[in-house]
Image (spheres, rainbow, N blue to C red):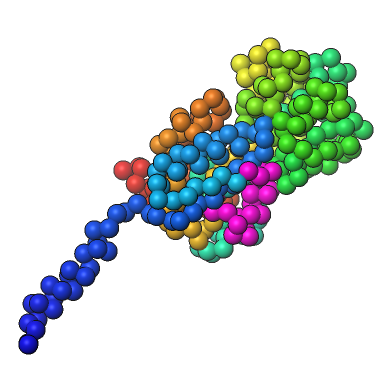
Amino acid sequence: MQVSRRSVLLAALAAAVPACTSTTTPRPAELVLATGPDGAVFREIGGALARALADELPATRVVERQTAASVENVRLLRAGEVHLGLSSLDPLVGAATLSADDPGGISAVGRLYDSFMQVAVPAGSSLRTLSDLAGRTVSFGPSESGTEFTATRLLSLLGIEVDARRMAHAEAARRLAAGSLDAVLALTGIPTPAITDVLPGFPLRLLDLPGEAEELARAYPGPYVPATIPATTYAGLGPCHTFAVPNLLLARSGLDADVVEVVTGTVFTQSARIAAGHPEASRINVRTGIATGQVPLHRGAERWFRAAKR
């Protein structure tokens, strides 16, 4: 039987219909998000984001991978072991793997909120300045954390030698209260769960770092900004002069642009849900989301931000 040209054309169009009319929601089998350690805001913000993404991508298994935080998250992204990860900006400055074009590179979904360096000591301690920590037992946060990276950089710059211990912020706060640590350094959002959890039963102070903050910013221009922790952050502690570092949500550059577009939209349209209970994290917004410094935006994030401006 002879087949007409019209029949052939209709058959071709029919074959193309599923591709044209299929859902635009991406359906990756799994999406792994690297967050942070016990007692850190990365852990809580990351967990809330993972739950929001699970709602937006019902056909996808969204996995929260709890980590030491920034440095480990960047390593896992480079190795392709996770798809998304949270990181402070300073370990990323000058990194060779920052690229939106290289599928194995790292790019940004967007800027989220700032972390503050907090140096907590017992309220009755004689420690008053950062230099007083010399020779003392101090927590630097977990190995491969942003706290460890920045604390090591800061104290090396100032020539302060301490007995540095590595542990999660929650464990460090408990040991501080038990008397086995002299101070806890935590570069994280505010209020920090590790501090708020021990404060009711153990009075603390935060050390002011005004001069140290300016010195760090001069030595490493870009990621560090002198800042003040508001008096309302922790009951009874008053304001604290320190420095802040922007936090980014990162993605593997090879992650599908449609997926990253959904992730970006979830972050910036559900920010109130994701940042619940964390006033500083409530600053997540579209206006500052593209301010990712030297880290290029993922092409899926670029697409979402362009559409959001219309």
Q: Is residue 188 above or below residue 253?
A: above
In which quadrant of the rendered view does residue 165 lie? top right
The N terminus - image quarter: bottom left
Q: Is residue 22 visible?
A: yes
In which quadrant of the rendered view does residue 223 lie? top right
Q: Is residue 133 visible?
A: no
Residue 73 highlighted magenta (yes or no)? yes
From which residue to which does the magenta span run? Answer: 66-84
**Residue 197 point in image, percent of width and height:** 68, 22
Residue 126 highlighted magenta (yes or no)? no
Q: Residue 204 versus residue 37: which sits nearer the camera?
A: 37
Horizontal side of 214 relative to 260 (left or right) equals right
Horizontal side of 27 relative to 189 (left or right) equals left
Horizontal side of 219 relative to 83 (left or right) equals right
**Residue 289 point in image, percent of width and height:** 48, 40
Q: Residue 255 versus residue 19: which sits nearer the camera?
A: 19
Q: Residue, x 73% and y 47% (percent of image)?
A: 144
Q: Residue, x 51% and y 36% (percent of image)?
A: 48
Q: Residue, x 61% and y 16% (percent of image)?
A: 232
